[in-house]
């Protein structure tokens, strides 16, 4: 992907004498720029593209539902797909990778659904890749599933996704309620569609695609032989032998399944799907079940209200980005971006001059706290929601541990500039919710407490993702919760009833123990939602500091040593996205966001006066562009080890935050790499 060059325009400034003024000026400009990106409702939102399977799924749903995409949109989508395609014709699992058959097959179909002919140069190139890598028979399981819905692959060739699993008692270790909510909510509509063997009727395009995607006549293919056929480039998590065994057993059941039981199971699934639709105002937890739930309605009642509303709500996932029109990974990034932007602004000494911006942010944060639990939430395996914040907005309806924590932290910090606090009972509800989410290992997971054993990961059927089966404690989520609890304690320890104060103290102690155990021998923490060890290590340090670790704490010293060991010669840090999949630090050219995380960690650990921090700050100042933004560089977000995702605003608030902390805790003097050497 194209990257804006970091640096050259700044050469003049890089050579300027290292004065505090430079740092201050960079902060002022960043504040102005960040302020200019705020939306009228007080929130920041950004492009959330990256994964390459989403747009094709959106298009498949429109095709199956007989809803043509507007020509204006089509153009943007073709632009996006063309820009994402690699010279060998392939697409990657995400926009920065290549060679994934799953996304290449889906993007091929997307091209064709968008009206491109098979002899279009790019389409032909993609087809050559597909035919050279095992044809559509070898793509990862989600690809085959989408093809089955489009009547381009036979259900016989899919591992069974049994609706009946949802009829098992919830105590059963394999009950879907134990799975990570994203996995559960994707396999829920999949099980429904599988159970009814949903597929659109074949039309001319179907017959054409059947010829294009395979190297032999469609009718001659024995799909049941291809359940385990998979291209090497699509495998991150190979199907394990226990998974294959379970699939065989379920496959046997599927051959003889009882019609009555199937009917009951489908009715149960429909009930859960309807609940998710209502709970999220049809937004759904994420883009994948947004598409799949839409299709469930579409197959059940093509012209029904739920189908119409589903398609209308899907539009909210589309994004006109710098590289074309894509489907975002969430309905928005609003709360997450707003909570961080607020904290970054508040870290500066100029926060007082940005009252309007902060007031707007506060309005958004206050308006998007979830105030009620969902009706009958236990029946649908939902955790309570009251007091929480989602990643995007209240309508989305799924509060998240760290989003709640960052929302609460931002709300509490806003008081320091004299903005009115949240009512006490709302603050208390957030704290109670955070406490209710803590796992028995002391850490915090993403949306729920850990509900199943880690061993369930052996049943991961996705091929392309890692770590999708169970929600479990993450250093990032844990640290965010600790940071918010520390702020709460500072503000309320004297005021509140001692019962809650005591419970918070115990929770923080347990969280700290989790964090210490999660630290790696080399001093780093592995991140799971950002790239990667710089992200994790910032959170690790932030969490330990929140838990009052002293500056000389050996865990902090080890974390700093890890970071210093990976600092680049130009003073910055750059971490490759492959760190996440490989689970080891893979360096890259310096990146403003990685550098900001490292500098935040180091300043948090009391290192601000170390010359290496001054060099890091210098890198940030020197790489800022004139309008106060930082250049767009490699993607900084990730999920499930393999899939990078774009956080468009990270480069606008993390460097600002880091510079503010650096300036605050040092004299703000910068050191250029040449001076340091
Ligand atoms: C997200 C987006 C937000 C993100 C943070 C809050 C930043 C993180 O700290 C915790 C995890 C979370 C909530 C997260 C998890 C995985 C998500 C939901 C995503 C990256 C957005 C899209 C992704 C989702 C899983 C995509 C669909 C793919 C599946 C494998 C189900």
Image: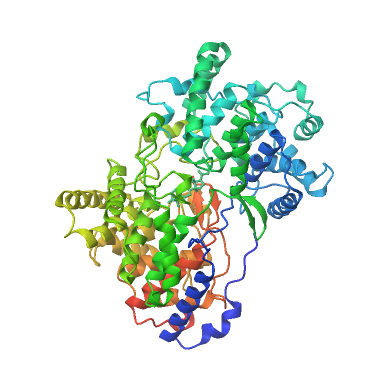
Q: In this view, does 563 lie above or below 73?
A: below
Work out which residue is located at the far right of the displayed protein and give it. 119
Q: Which of 661 and 72 is in front in this view?
A: 72
Q: Where is residue 473 in the image (x, y as percent from the top left)?
A: 35, 45
Outermost residue, left side: 498
491 shown above or below 106: below
**Residue 541 x/y as whole percent:** 33, 60
Q: Which residue is drawn at 35% across and 60% down?
A: 411
- Above or below, 379 against 606 in this view is above
In this rendering, position of residue 47 left or right of residue 538: right
Residue 1 image offset from top left, x and y in percent: 64, 59
- Colour setting: rainbow
Could you say which quadrant of the image residue 123 lies in?
A: top right
Please state the horizontal and vertical placement of residue 590, each as a whole percent of the image: 52, 68
Residue 570 visible in the displayed image:
no
Residue under the point 18% across and 55% down: 496
How many numbered markers are drawn?
0
Q: Is residue 481 visible?
A: yes
Residue 355 to residue 288: above or below: below
Q: Which residue is drawn at 45% across and 24% down?
A: 166
Q: Which of 604 and 589 is in front in this view?
A: 604
Q: In which quarter of the image is the C terminus?
A: bottom left
């Amino acid at each position: 992907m194209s990257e804006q060059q970091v640096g050259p325009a700044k050469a003049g400034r890089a050579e300027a004498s290292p004065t505090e003024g430079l740092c201050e000026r960079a902060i002022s400009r960043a504040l102005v720029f960040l302020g200019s990106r705020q939306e009228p409702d007080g929130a920041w939102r950004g492009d959330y593209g990256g994964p390459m399977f989403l747009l094709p799924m959106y298009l498949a749903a429109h095709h199956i539902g007989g809803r043509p995409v507007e020509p204006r949109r089509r153009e943007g989508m073709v632009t996006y797909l063309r820009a994402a395609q690699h010279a060998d014709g392939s697409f990657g699992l995400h926009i920065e990778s290549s060679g994934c058959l799953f996304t290449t097959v889906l993007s091929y179909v997307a091209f064709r659904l968008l009206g491109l002919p098979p002899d279009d140069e790019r389409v032909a190139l993609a087809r050559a890749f597909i035919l050279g890598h095992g044809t559509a028979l070898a793509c990862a399981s989600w690809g085959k599933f989408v093809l089955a819905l489009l009547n381009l692959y036979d259900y016989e060739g899919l591992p069974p996704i049994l609706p009946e699993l949802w009829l098992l008692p919830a105590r059963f270790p394999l009950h879907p309620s134990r799975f990570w909510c994203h996995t559960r909510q994707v396999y829920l509509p999949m099980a429904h569609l599988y159970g009814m063997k949903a597929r659109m009727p074949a039309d001319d395009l179907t017959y054409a695609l059947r010829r294009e995607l395979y190297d032999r006549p469609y009718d001659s293919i024995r799909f049941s032989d291809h359940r385990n056929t998979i291209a090497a480039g699509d495998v991150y998590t190979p199907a394990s032998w226990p998974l294959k065994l379970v699939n065989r057993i379920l496959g046997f059941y599927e051959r003889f399944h009882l019609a009555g039981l199937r009917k009951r199971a489908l009715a149960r699934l429909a009930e859960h799907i309807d609940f998710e639709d209502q709970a999220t105002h049809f937004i759904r937890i994420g883009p994948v079940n947004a598409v799949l739930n839409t299709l469930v309605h579409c197959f059940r009642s093509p012209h029904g209200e739920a189908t119409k509303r589903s398609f209308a709500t899907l539009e909210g996932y589309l994004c006109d980005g710098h590289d074309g029109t894509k489907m975002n990974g969430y309905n928005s990034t609003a709360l997450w971006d707003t909570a961080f932007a607020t904290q970054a602004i508040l870290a500066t000494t100029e926060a007082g001059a940005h009252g309007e911006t902060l007031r707007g942010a506060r309005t958004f944060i206050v308006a998007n706290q979830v105030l009620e639990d969902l009706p009958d939430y236990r029946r649908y395996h939902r955790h309570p929601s009251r007091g929480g914040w989602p990643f995007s907005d209240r309508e989305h309806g799924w509060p998240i541990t760290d989003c709640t924590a960052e929302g609460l932290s931002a709300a509490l910090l806003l008081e320091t500039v004299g903005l009115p606090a949240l009512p006490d009972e709302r603050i208390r509800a957030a704290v109670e919710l955070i406490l209710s989410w803590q796992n028995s290992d002391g850490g915090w997971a993403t949306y729920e407490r850990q509900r199943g054993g880690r061993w369930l990961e052996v049943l991961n059927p996705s091929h392309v993702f890692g770590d999708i089966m169970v929600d479990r404690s993450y250093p990032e989520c844990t640290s965010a919760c600790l940071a918010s609890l520390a702020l709460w304690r500072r503000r309320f320890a004297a005021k509140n009833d001692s019962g809650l104060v005591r419970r918070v103290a115990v929770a923080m102690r347990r969280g700290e123990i989790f964090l210490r155990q999660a630290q790696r021998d080399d001093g780093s923490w592995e991140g799971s939602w950002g790239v990667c060890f710089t992200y994790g290590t910032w959170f690790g340090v932030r969490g330990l500091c929140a838990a009052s670790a002293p500056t000389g704490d050996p865990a902090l010293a080890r974390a700093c040593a890890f970071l210093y060991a990976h600092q680049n010669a130009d003073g910055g840090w750059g971490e490759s996205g492959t760190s996440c999949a490989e689970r080891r630090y893979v360096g890259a050219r310096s990146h403003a966001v990685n550098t900001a995380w490292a500098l935040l960690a180091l300043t948090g650990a009391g290192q601000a006066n170390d010359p290496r921090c001054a060099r890091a700050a210098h890198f940030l100042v020197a790489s800022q562009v004139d309008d106060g933004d930082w250049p767009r560089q490699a993607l900084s977000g990730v999920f499930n080890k393999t899939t990078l995702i774009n956080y468009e605003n990270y480069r606008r608030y993390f460097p600002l935050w880091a510079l503010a902390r650096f300036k605050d805790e040092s004299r703000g003097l910068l050191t250029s790499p040449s001076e340091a050497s």
